[in-house]
């Protein structure tokens, strides 16, 4: 049994030609994919509705939510849409701003992959000093094939004692400021750069939860320090999420801070505007 020979002939000689005649001659398929970090789907859709309310129907706009990157897809099926593409893609990327990671072809790349590509082009090496993420940032970096070109060492210093032993963080800082503090992550960052002889670093210390929070440092508090030995930048955020999601998000934000630093981006990302936390 199978498809009768007569049906195959009918399909090729009658059905397919009829379908082909009903398809417009100007039908094309043009797909553009953009990777975005720091703007969620609902936030970006709201911005587009407000700033690009006359978005053309000839260009279909779609989103594929992911962690940590959001993929924005522009699909065009007509020559009219193709003629509009350049103008409206420019308008869209202007709205996305520095949250745009890249336009991609083929398999999506991770945010760590994009960072390491930049570092390799600039002949730079990176290191990490992690507490609350337990080595997850280093793991994300080393998932990328060829990462050893730019990454030689990372430090997981979960306890205060190991922060002092491995990164030379002064013990007095823990009593004065606490482990989750600006002073400690700066010391972690500098220690990691000195120990590894890397060019750039990202250091993090936070309260991953669900236990361990306090009134002045609630669960989700996290300090970041990143940059070079003579230019360390810092930021405190409040990310009150479940432990695993917190760690994933902190890792992605840390990598994005380095991406922005390398590219000399000075605008404030959306996640800092929404989640900045005042903590000594």
Image (cartoon, grey):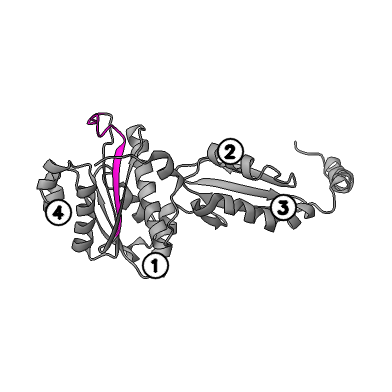
Identify residue for label 4. 166
Identify residue for label 2. 46
Is disc 4 placed on a helix, strand or loop? Answer: helix
Q: Which residues are magenta?
A: 211-227
The residues bearing labels 3 and 4 have C-alpha atoms spaced at a distance of: 55 Å
The answer to whether the residue labelled 3 contacts the one labelled 2, judged by CB atoms less than 8 Å apart, is: no
- Of labels 3 and 4, earlier in sequence is 3
In the picture, measured across the screen, residue 248 lies left or right of residue 162, that is right
Between label 3 and label 1, give the one nearer the viewer.
Answer: 1
The residues bearing labels 2 and 1 have C-alpha atoms spaced at a distance of: 36 Å
In the picture, measured across the screen, residue 95 lies left or right of residue 273, that is right
How crowded is the residue under tag 1: few (<14 C-alpha within 10 Å), some, or many (20+)?
A: some
Identify residue for label 1. 120
Identify residue for label 3. 29
Task: Give the quarter of the image for residue 202.
Answer: bottom left
Percent x, y of residue 70: 52, 45
Check residue 42 in the rendering and tell me which mark sits there, or answer none.
none
């Amino acid at each position: 049994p199978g498809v009768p020979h007569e049906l195959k002939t009918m399909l090729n000689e009658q059905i397919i030609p009829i379908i082909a005649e009903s398809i417009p001659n100007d039908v094309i398929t043009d797909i553009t994919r953009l990777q975005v970090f720091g703007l969620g789907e609902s936030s970006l859709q709201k911005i587009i509705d407000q700033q690009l309310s006359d978005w053309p129907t000839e260009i279909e706009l779609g989103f594929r939510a992911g962690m940590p990157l959001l993929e924005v897809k522009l699909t065009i099926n007509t020559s009219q849409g193709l003629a509009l593409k350049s103008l409206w893609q420019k308008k869209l990327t202007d709205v996305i701003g520095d949250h745009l990671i890249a336009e991609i072809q083929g398999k999506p790349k991770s945010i760590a992959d994009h960072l390491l590509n930049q570092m390799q082009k600039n002949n730079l090496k990176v290191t990490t000093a992690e507490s609350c993420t337990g080595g997850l940032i280093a793991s994300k970096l080393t998932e990328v094939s060829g990462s050893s070109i730019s990454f030689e060492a990372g430090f997981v210093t979960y306890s205060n004692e190991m922060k002092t032993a491995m990164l030379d963080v002064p013990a007095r800082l823990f009593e004065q400021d606490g482990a989750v503090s600006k002073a400690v992550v700066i010391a972690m960052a500098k220690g990691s750069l000195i120990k590894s002889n890397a060019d750039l670093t990202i250091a993090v210390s936070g309260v991953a939860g669900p236990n361990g929070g306090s009134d002045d440092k609630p669960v989700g508090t996290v300090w970041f320090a990143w940059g070079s030995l003579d230019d360390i930048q810092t930021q405190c955020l409040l990310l009150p999420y479940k432990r695993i999601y917190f760690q994933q998000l902190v890792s992605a934000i840390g990598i994005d801070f380095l991406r922005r630093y390398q590219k000399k981006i000075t605008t404030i990302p959306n996640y800092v505007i929404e989640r900045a936390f005042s903590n000594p």
